[in-house]
């Protein structure tokens, strides 16, 4: 109920349109009485009292009224659809806005496919509650009351007999509505899971092909798809039983009504026209009831979808996203003081880390895979918050500053250089919204990327392809270095690519990186000897602990973990 009220509250944002829609629903409903009324007029007045002169005017009034009713119906359909589109847009944008304000941690436990399913499917289904659900439910209740009033007016005895099937129908549909709700929920969850698998598999299509695991992927998809079918079928099976049951009760009611009507007419209690008129009106009386099943289904599905949408909307925003301290300038003095962090309740990923970077220094993070190097960068960007200890920038504790400000000061070049499927210009302008083409070309030059961009037929207008598929690994890296250069941030976080590049490309990338590193504090996850040699300090991480730190020469002399790492991975360089 609370969810329903919440959905309805959205319609209040369009009070005129909602009000107008409701008025038209009432008008349409009142005009349903035309058909039974006219029928009765024909039988009891025109035929019984032999008044042929009334045939044409009565028919004309009838046709006119039906025309008006259908005209209003057209308007109502148009208005309702436009209201639904507006509401869908409103909630969809609200949901997307929310998604952007959720912490990175939230995305760890919610798959992209599932989220897409909520935005693409659940939002429209939610709004169907308003249009198909509320609007039609109100129209149905109104129609029921008006037609019943009309019937009572002509014969209360015949009306009571007509209503006999009603309680049975009510019991059956209420029971079914309750029973089908969890079924719809399961069906909806199965659809989300299917979408999640589809999204995951499409993202990893190259891996699937490269490892020739298509049959296994197909099997997973097949099972998930089958589950959607099974869950939906369990509802449909129920519908297949309930729906004819409702029709059986309702139609048996017609026989009962006509039988009692015939008996009353024979007794002379009512005119035969009343019975025929009841027969016509019956259609209008039971039309809302027959729609209850579909309506109940729309409601149930809509509420399930709305709950899923509202669950995201109610998730608390990332803290300090916009609010918090915004210092004038950042010099890039970074301190970690006894920082610990765990992704979950298990063992900490970062354990009492203390380290310092003076402005302009380059700190190289080295260590085996899983040692916690990326996590250190994730803590600096505040994608995650330390569970103990604190990080300071220019002496200011990080948890007090606005994340927007912090991220404005950061350049983050990740190993997987992500490009959006739009023009290179727009991809680069992410770093600086109004960057001119000249500025962009300068950044591309410094990143050793100008050559291949110039060689592309569309230059800066070249579309990068999904995830930047149009460009090679080395090219993408240089483009993302250019992006960071354009931003010109005081603090740079760099995850050096592990993928082997050919010597020429490697040299070009290294040069670009040097241009990028100059004059700013830089944390680099280092995989290459040349990088660590140039670093002011090398920090060796092992299971989230800082076990050694110093310059390349100092650490080699120490002969500890670093020198072993060097032998193992950097030595061939
Ligand atoms: P490195 O960069 O040194 O290879 P990471 O910082 O990426 O190491 O990871 C450190 C540990 O944290 C690993 O055991 C990894 O599995 C775990 N980890 C990384 N990211 C997440 C995450 N989003 N959720 C849970 N665990 C994670």
Image (cartoon, rainbow, N blue to C red):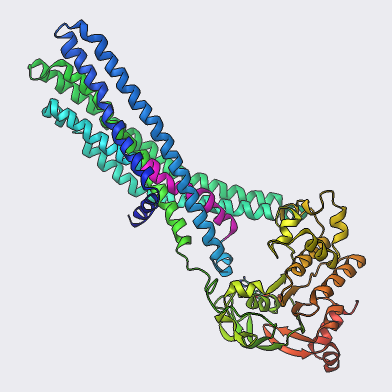
Depicted 147 relative to depicted 368: above or below: above
- What residue is shown at x 75% (from left), y 85% (from top)? 540
On whether residue 130 falls in the magenta region, the answer is yes
**The N terminus, quarter of image:** bottom left
**The C terminus, quarter of image:** bottom right
Residue 190: give x, y in percent of width and height: 51, 51
Residue 169, located in which quarter of the rendered image? top left
- What residue is shown at x 78% (from left), y 67% (from top)? 481
On whether residue 56 falls in the magenta region, the answer is no
Depicted 142 relative to depicted 70: above or below: below
- What residue is shown at x 83% (from left), y 81% (from top)? 532
Q: Magenta part mainly helix, strand or loop?
A: helix
Q: Looking at this view, is 389 or 334 the one in front?
A: 334
Residue 488, located in which quarter of the rendered image? bottom right
Q: Looking at this view, is 237 or 1 the one in front?
A: 1
Residue 161: give x, y in percent of width and height: 15, 29
Asked if residue 20 can be seen in this view, the reply is yes
Depicted 153 relative to depicted 215: above or below: above
Depicted 451 relative to depicted 232: above or below: below
- Side (left or right) of 96 relative to 408: left
* Chain part drawn in magenta: 111-133
Asked if residue 383 can be seen in this view, the reply is no
Residue 264: give x, y in percent of width and height: 10, 20
Quadrant of picture, ligand 1: bottom right
Residue 177: give x, y in percent of width and height: 34, 46
Q: Looking at this view, is 433 or 190 the one in front?
A: 433
């Amino acid at each position: 109920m609370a969810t329903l009220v919440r959905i309805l509250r959205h319609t209040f944002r369009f009070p005129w349109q909602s009000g107008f829609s409701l008025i038209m629903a009432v008008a349409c409903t009142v005009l349903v009485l035309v058909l039974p009324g006219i029928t009765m007029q024909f039988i009891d007045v025109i035929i019984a009292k032999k008044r042929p002169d009334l045939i044409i005017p009565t028919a004309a009034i009838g046709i006119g009224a039906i025309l008006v009713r259908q005209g209003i119906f057209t308007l109502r359909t148009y208005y309702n659809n436009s209201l639904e589109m507006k509401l869908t847009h409103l909630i969809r944008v609200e949901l997307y806005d929310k998604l952007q304000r959720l912490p990175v941690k939230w995305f760890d436990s919610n798959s992209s496919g599932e989220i897409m399913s909520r935005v693409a499917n659940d939002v429209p289904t939610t709004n169907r509650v308003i249009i198909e659900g509320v609007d039609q439910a109100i129209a149905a209740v109104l129609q029921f009351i008006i037609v019943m009033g009309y019937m009572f007016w002509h014969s209360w005895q015949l009306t009571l007999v007509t209503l006999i099937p009603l309680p049975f129908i009510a019991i059956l549909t209420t029971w079914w509505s309750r029973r089908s709700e969890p079924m719809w929920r399961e069906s909806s969850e199965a659809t989300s899971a299917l979408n999640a698998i589809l999204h995951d598999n499409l993202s990893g299509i190259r891996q699937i092909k490269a490892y020739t695991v298509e049959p296994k992927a197909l099997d997973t998809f097949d099972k998930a798809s089958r589950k959607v079918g099974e869950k939906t079928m369990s509802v449909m099976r129920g519908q297949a039983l309930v729906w004819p049951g409702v029709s059986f009760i309702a139609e048996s009611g017609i026989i009962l009504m006509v039988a009692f009507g015939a008996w009353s007419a024979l007794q002379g209690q009512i005119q035969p026209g009343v019975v025929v008129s009841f027969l016509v009106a019956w259609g209008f009386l039971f039309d809302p009831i027959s729609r209850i099943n579909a309506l109940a289904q729309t409601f149930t599905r809509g509420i399930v979808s709305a709950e899923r949408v509202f669950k995201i909307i109610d998730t608390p925003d990332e803290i300090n996203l916009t609010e918090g301290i915004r210092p004038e300038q950042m010099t890039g003095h970074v301190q970690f003081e006894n920082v610990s962090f765990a992704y979950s309740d298990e063992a900490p990923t970062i354990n009492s880390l203390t380290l310092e970077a003076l402005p302009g220094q380059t700190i190289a993070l080295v260590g085996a895979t899983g040692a916690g190097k990326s996590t250190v960068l994730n803590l600096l960007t505040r994608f995650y918050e330390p569970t103990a200890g604190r990080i300071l920038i220019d002496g200011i504790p990080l948890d007090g500053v606005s994340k927007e400000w912090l991220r404005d000061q950061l350049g983050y070049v990740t190993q997987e250089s992500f490009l959006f499927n739009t023009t290179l210009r727009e991809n680069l302008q992410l770093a600086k919204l109004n960057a001119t083409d000249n500025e962009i070309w300068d950044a591309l030059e410094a990143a050793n990327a100008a050559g291949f961009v110039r060689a592309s037929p569309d230059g800066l207008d070249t579309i990068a392809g999904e995830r930047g598929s149009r460009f090679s690994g080395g090219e993408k890296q240089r483009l993302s270095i250019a992006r960071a250069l354009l931003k010109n941030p005081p603090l740079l976080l760099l995850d050096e690519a592990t993928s082997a590049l050919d010597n020429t490309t490697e040299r070009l990338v290294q040069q670009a990186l040097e241009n990028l590193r100059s004059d700013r504090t830089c944390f680099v996850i280092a995989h290459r000897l040349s990088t660590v040699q140039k670093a002011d300090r090398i920090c060796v991480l092992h299971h989230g602990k800082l076990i050694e730190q110093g310059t390349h020469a100092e650490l080699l002399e120490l002969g500890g973990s670093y020198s072993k790492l060097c032998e193992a991975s950097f030595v061939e360089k």
